[in-house]
Amino acid sequence: MLRKLSLAIAVSCASNGVVWAAAVPMTVRTDLVSVYQEAVDNNADLAAARADYGARREVVPQARAGLLPNLSAGADMMHTRTKLDEPSITSNRSGNAWS
């Protein structure tokens, strides 16, 4: 008797779920994967963990950059022109050093 009652309840619940699923339009129904993906996209803890992971990955290239050689260059030029009947003209030019 109890077995028949539990079977009847199970069939009733299963048929109600099928009827409800058929009554809901396809655009409203969502599958489990899309619900999971939306939960992952909107989870603040996961977003913070992703940002922290990205920041920690960036530490390695920054540390490696300190070990690489630096290249710097500079330029100086001096020109003096002297004529006996005029005062001497001196011009100095200096360039920036880039590193």
Image (cartoon, rainbow, N blue to C red):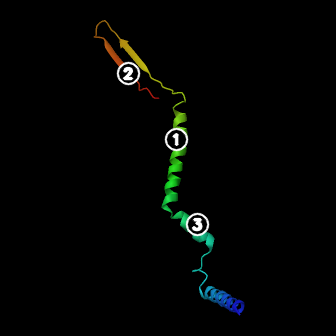
Tell me which residue sits at (34%, 18%) in the image: 91
Residue 9, above or below 59: below
Q: Residue at x 51, y 32 (%)?
A: 66
Q: CA distance from mark 1 to mark 3?
A: 29 Å
Name the residue beneath numbered marker 1. Answer: 59
Secondary structure beneath disc 3? Answer: helix
- Ranked by sequence position, the earlier of labels 3 and 2 is 3
> Which quadrant: the N terminus?
bottom right
Q: Is residue 21 left or right of residue 93?
A: right
Q: In what element is the residue under mark 1?
A: helix
Q: Earlier in the sequence, mark 1 or mark 3?
A: 3
Of the numbered discs in the image, which one, if any, rests on residue 43?
none
Q: How many marks?
A: 3
Camera-side residue: 80 or 57? 57
Inter-mark Cα distance, 2 to 1: 41 Å
Query: Given the image, on which type of amino acid does mark 1 rest?
Result: Val
Quarter of the image where one finds residue 23: bottom right
Tell me the tag on residue 93: 2
Residue where numbered disc 3 is placed:
37
Q: Amino acid at mark 3?
A: Gln
Question: Distance from label 3 to label 2 (Cα)?
Answer: 63 Å
- Crowdedness near tag 2: few (<14), some (14–19) or many (≥20) residues, C-alpha within 10 Å: few
Q: Is residue 2 left or right of residue 54?
A: right
Give percent across and percent down for residue 60: 55, 39
Residue 33 image point, x, y percent: 62, 69
Q: Residues within 10 Å of mark 3 (few under 14, many from 20)?
A: few
**Residue 80, position as x, y percentages in the image:** 36, 12
